[in-house]
């Protein structure tokens, strides 16, 4: 029982981690907040379903294609909406509202293209479940955890050891100075939004076979992902992963051992407690208060 | 008060006449649905004006005002249902309750900057929504909701839409006058100073936390009262009315009209309500319409309809003046 609970806690925790990582990346790079992240997750789940079941592509190809589409979506969103607003010098809240508007549009468009019905993936892996210490665990869950961790580790390596990652970190730290060093800061900000969208879509296609695919799949996860990001320290890349996984574990453990009535409240309560008591989070990221 | 008397013009008299005769006009053209929409407009004007005190004057965003709307609505209905208090009293008590809860939330939240304030208020809104849906002992009726009575004004029942319209009109008058007096007082000037630059305001000896909490609490009172009005107009409340979407709608209305003024939120609430009502046929695409509306405001009309119109008129007037000066 405990192992199964832990596995499902890890699955949703990894998803929160991927979403929170996107939030932190965007915040680091442009000081903005993206409320469309959750609906990109939904988009990812629906796109993955379409590529995999309707077009009959192999799961890995469907996965790569979905991430690519979301990547382009993130790039466009930054270029045609967010950049426009920032160059107009509007208040930060307008950018936040613009992303909320995008999330509404996205949600309704998904509903118009697909339907409000819940869709179910057929079995992706030939073996439905594997047995670990005598407990059977869904193979999709293990795949989800593995790929999430690979993606998170890959991102850290990319940010730390590649030329482009270094450029991105530089422009996040001080855009003007980075520009003076010849870094294309507008490209790096765009790529940041694109990576965040790509990760959200990846989370969607990984989660789809486990939770099923429906319109509201992402919106709650997107909002709860903020709790993960805040807990770790908003803007801290390690913190986002840790916060996300912790949130998933806490939520699942309390739901299965204490009470599931207030399951949805735990994330928001944690968010408020951290914001009010320790806004810098576990990793003590200093970016958050005035 | 002086400016209210001074601004007495025939055009204002005409507006007042239209406002007073609106239900009669609507029924004359056989459009009685318009009366109901006007009733909704009155309560939205109050809610959005309250939000504007918080955002437009003091510069603090709230993306969770649906929570105060809910506290006002559920508070009033439950006080009436379980304690049998008269409805007008329950509306006021519930609004005071919303004010207190608002102050309690605003105190720790006052040190957060924009993004994180919006996150905190969203989280608060979600917590209130979850509590409505899973209340201990089912006192809120959970997913089913609660039915209630119409307002009883010392024996005079406000049980038709026309009667509610006049009740709403009086409420809007009182609340907007109160807002006018508040923002033109010492407190209002402190709010403006905080909005422009909280460090400078602090340096001038303004207690930033105190005034921020005050603005948030006052706006919670406005929105709470609007929620109570909603409950006794519709005579049924359910949790679905008080989701995050409602909070975003308040913000949209406020920004659509224009912030930091008396007439901006008024215009915004009425226009957004008219747009959503006239697009009722496309209910399926309501979110899409909303999204585009919000995006349009944010991208194209950062000052809101009222703010931009005022600016345009000001520019034309300045040009004319400039032209005259040139000619002479």
Image (cartoon, coloured by chain):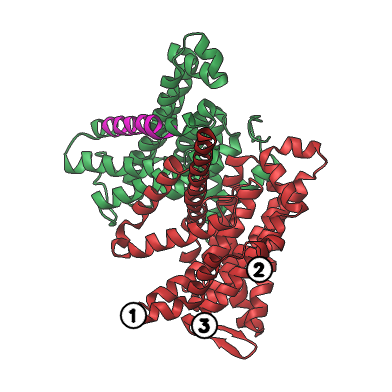
Badge 1 and badge 3 both on one subunit = yes
Query: Gap between marks 1 and 3, in whole Å?
Result: 17 Å
Residue shown at 47% from the left, 9% from the top:
A182
Query: Gap between marks 2 and 1, in whole Å?
Result: 36 Å
Query: Furthest-right residue in view?
Result: B205
- Position of A4 compared to B99: left or right? left
Q: Nearer the viewer, mark 1 or mark 3?
A: 1
Badge 2 and badge 1 both on one subunit = yes
Q: In which quarter of the image is residue B222?
A: bottom right
Image hue for chain A: green
Tell whether position A69 is magenta. Answer: yes
- Foreground pick, B167 / A154: B167
Badge 3 and badge 2 both on one subunit = yes
Q: Which residue is tagged 1?
A: B30
What span is colored magenta in the figure? A64-82
Label disc, if present, on residue B95 of the rendered structure: 2
């Amino acid at each position: 029982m405990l192992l199964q609970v832990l596995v499902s806690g890890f699955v949703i925790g990894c998803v929160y981690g991927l979403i929170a990582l996107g939030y932190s990346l965007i915040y680091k790079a442009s000081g903005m907040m993206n409320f469309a992240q959750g609906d990109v997750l939904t988009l990812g789940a629906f796109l993955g379903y379409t590529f995999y079941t309707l077009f009959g592509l192999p799961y890995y190809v469907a996965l790569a294609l979905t991430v690519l589409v979301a990547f382009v979506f993130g790039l466009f969103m930054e270029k045609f909406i967010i950049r426009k607003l920032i160059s107009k010098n509007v208040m930060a809240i307008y950018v936040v509202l613009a992303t909320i508007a995008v999330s509404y549009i996205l949600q309704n468009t998904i509903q118009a293209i697909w339907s409000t019905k819940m869709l179910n993936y057929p079995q992706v892996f030939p073996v439905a479940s594997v047995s670990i210490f005598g407990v059977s665990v869904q193979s999709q869950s293990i795949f989800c955890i593995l790929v999430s961790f690979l993606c998170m580790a890959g991102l850290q390596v990319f940010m730390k050891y590649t030329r482009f990652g270094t450029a991105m970190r530089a422009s996040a730290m001080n855009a003007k100075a980075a520009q003076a060093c010849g870094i294309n800061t507008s490209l790096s900000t765009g790529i940041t939004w694109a990576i965040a969208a790509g990760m959200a879509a990846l989370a969607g296609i990984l989660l789809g076979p486990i939770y099923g695919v429906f319109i509201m799949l992402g919106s709650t996860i997107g909002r709860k992902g903020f709790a993960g990001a805040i807990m770790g320290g908003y803007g801290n890349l390690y913190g986002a992963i840790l916060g996300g996984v912790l949130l998933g574990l806490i939520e699942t453990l309390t739901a299965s051992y204490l009470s599931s009535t207030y399951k949805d409240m735990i994330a928001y309560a944690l968010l408020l407690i951290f914001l009010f008591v320790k806004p810098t989070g576990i990793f003590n990221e200093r970016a958050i208060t005035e | 008060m002086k400016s209210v008397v001074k601004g007495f013009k025939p055009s204002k008299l005409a507006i007042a006449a239209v406002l007073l005769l609106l239900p009669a006009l609507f029924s004359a053209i056989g459009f009685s649905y318009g009366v109901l929409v006007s009733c909704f407009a009155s309560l939205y004007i109050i809610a959005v004006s309250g939000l504007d005190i918080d955002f437009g004057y003091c510069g603090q965003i709230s993306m969770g005002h649906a929570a105060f709307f809910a506290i006002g609505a559920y508070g009033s209905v439950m006080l009436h249902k379980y304690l049998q208090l008269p409805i007008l009293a329950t509306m006021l008590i519930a609004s005071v309750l919303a004010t207190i809860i608002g102050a309690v939330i605003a105190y720790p939240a006052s040190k957060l900057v924009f993004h994180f304030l919006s996150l905190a208020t969203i989280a608060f809104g979600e917590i209130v929504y979850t509590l409505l849906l899973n209340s201990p002992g089912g006192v809120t009726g959970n997913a089913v909701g609660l039915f209630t009575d119409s307002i009883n004004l010392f024996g005079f029942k406000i049980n038709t839409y026309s009667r509610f319209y006049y009740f709403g009109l009086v409420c809007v008058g009182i609340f907007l006058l109160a807002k006018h007096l508040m923002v033109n007082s010492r407190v209002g000037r402190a709010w403006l100073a905080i909005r422009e630059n909280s460090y400078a305001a602090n340096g001038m000896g303004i207690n930033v936390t105190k005034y921020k909490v005050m603005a948030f609490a006052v706006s919670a009172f406005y929105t709470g009262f609007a929620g109570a009005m909603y409950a006794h107009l519709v005579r049924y409340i359910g949790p679905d009315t008080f989701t995050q979407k409602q909070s975003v709608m308040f913000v949209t209305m406020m920004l659509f009209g224009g912030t930091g003024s008396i007439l901006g939120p008024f215009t915004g609430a009425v226009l957004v309500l008219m747009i959503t009502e006239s697009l009722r046929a496309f209910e399926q695409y309501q979110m899409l319409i909303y999204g585009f509306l919000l995006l349009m405001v944010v991208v194209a009309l950062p000052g809101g309809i009222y703010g931009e119109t005022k600016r345009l008129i000001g520019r034309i007037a300045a040009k004319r003046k400039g032209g005259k000066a040139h000619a002479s």
